[in-house]
Image (cartoon, grey):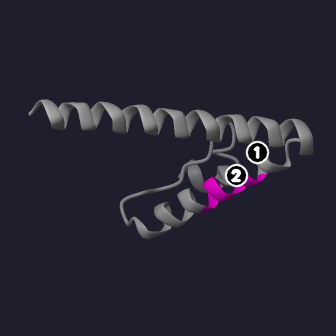
Amino acid sequence: MVAKAEQERRAAIIRAEGESEAAKLISDATVALGMGLIELRKIEASREIATTLAKTLSVAYLPNANNMLLGLNPSVAGR
């Protein structure tokens, strides 16, 4: 039991060190190369989200409230 807790503690430390190193590398790349890496990651994440949503039948897209009624024909909507 103690050995398992120690192993989990070490795993958490190693994972945190890895995440810290990854964040440092991304930060260094952003400084050296600009925001292109961040923008690329945003595009990749958006693509992954869109793919997931496209496969889900129970998800409906609603535009923001300002644009929601722009496509309505007032003469038809009032009937």
Which residue was labeled with disc 2? 41
Mark 1 touching mark 2, by CB under 8 A?
yes
* Image position of 79 (left or right of 31): left
Quarter of the rendering occupied by the N terminus: top left
Horizontally, residue 45 falls left or right of residue 51, namely: right
Q: Residues within 10 Å of mark 1 (few under 14, many from 20)?
A: some
State whether residue 72 is above or below residue 27: below
Say which quarter of the image contains residue 40. Answer: bottom right
Residue 30 lies within the magenta run: no
Asked if residue 65 can be seen in this view, the reply is no
Q: Position of residue 78 (x, y in %)?
A: 57, 47
Q: Nearer the viewer, residue 22 or 35?
A: 22
- Find the distance from the CA under tag 1 to the CA under tag 2: 5 Å
The residues colored magenta run: 40-47
For disc 1, the marked residue is 38
The answer to whether residue 48 is above or below residue 63 is: below
Q: Residue at x 55, y 38 (%)?
A: 19
Residue 36: percent from the left, percent from the top? 85, 49
Q: Which amino acid, mark 1?
A: Ile
User: Which residue sits at x=53%, y=52%?
Assistant: 79
Q: Quick one: which residue is furthest to the bottom in this view?
A: 55
Kindly tell me whether residue 73 is visible in this rendering.
yes
* Viewer-nearest residue: 75 or 53: 53
Residue 59: percent from left, percent from top:
42, 57
Crowding at dot 2, Cα within 10 Å, few <14 / some 14-19 / many 20+, comes out as few
Residue placed most toward the observer, 41 or 50 = 41
Element type where label 2 sits in the image: helix
